[in-house]
Image: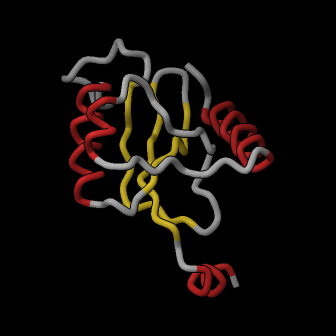
Amino acid sequence: MWSLETLAAINAEIETEARRQNLEPYHPSGPEEVEAMESFPFPSLGDIPDDWEETESFWVDHTGWGKASEPALTIDQFRSLLYDHVADNPDDAYAITEEGPFQLVVSALRRVRSDVADTLNS
């Protein structure tokens, strides 16, 4: 089990590397793309990037060992919820915003207009 300090440090490193690589959240073309997903195509960003806001988050077991009765979503449960979310929110993009050894957080993100972002950041 990793300590909170270790998790925070790892995610800070992920965020630094994602910014260096100019990674952007992943925008699926539609629910059909979600249905065909075999893995997580989402970039790991370590945090919510500037100019984006989180609209929803999903706590997902990424090992494939999780059970439906556990708190974290299984990959199949997540795919089902994501299918509906993409259908209902076609403008949202997705990224891994927190990562641990067994679970991760996939955030649904919406770009904030630059005039709003400037107001929020001042």
Figure quadrant of the N terminus: top right
Residue, far top: 65
Would you say 117 lies left or right of 107 here?
A: right
Residue under the image location 46 percent in, 51 percent down = 27
Count of numbered labels shown in the rendering = 0
Q: What residue appears at the point 64 percent right and 65 percent down from the top-left corner? A: 50
| Observer-nearest of 31 and 49 | 31
Please provide percent x and percent y for residue 51: 60, 69
In this rendering, position of residue 113 left or right of residue 85: right
Which residue appears at 60% of the width and 81% of the height?
Answer: 120
Q: In the rendered image of this protein, does residue 12 appear above or below residue 38?
A: below
Question: Picture quarter containing residue 81?
Answer: top left
Report the quarter where the C terminus lies.
bottom right
Where residue 70 appears, as percent x and y from the top left, is 26, 24
Compared with residue 96, is residue 93 higher up or lower down, i.e. above or below? below
Q: Residue 85: horizontal and vertical position, in percent?
A: 27, 52
Question: Measured along the vertical axis of the image, is residue 48 above or below residue 112?
Answer: above
| Res. 7 image quadrant | top right
Q: Position of residue 64 (x, y in %)?
A: 37, 15
Q: Is residue 1 left or right of residue 50?
A: left
Q: Is residue 100 above or below residue 95?
A: above
Residue at image position (24%, 54%) is 87
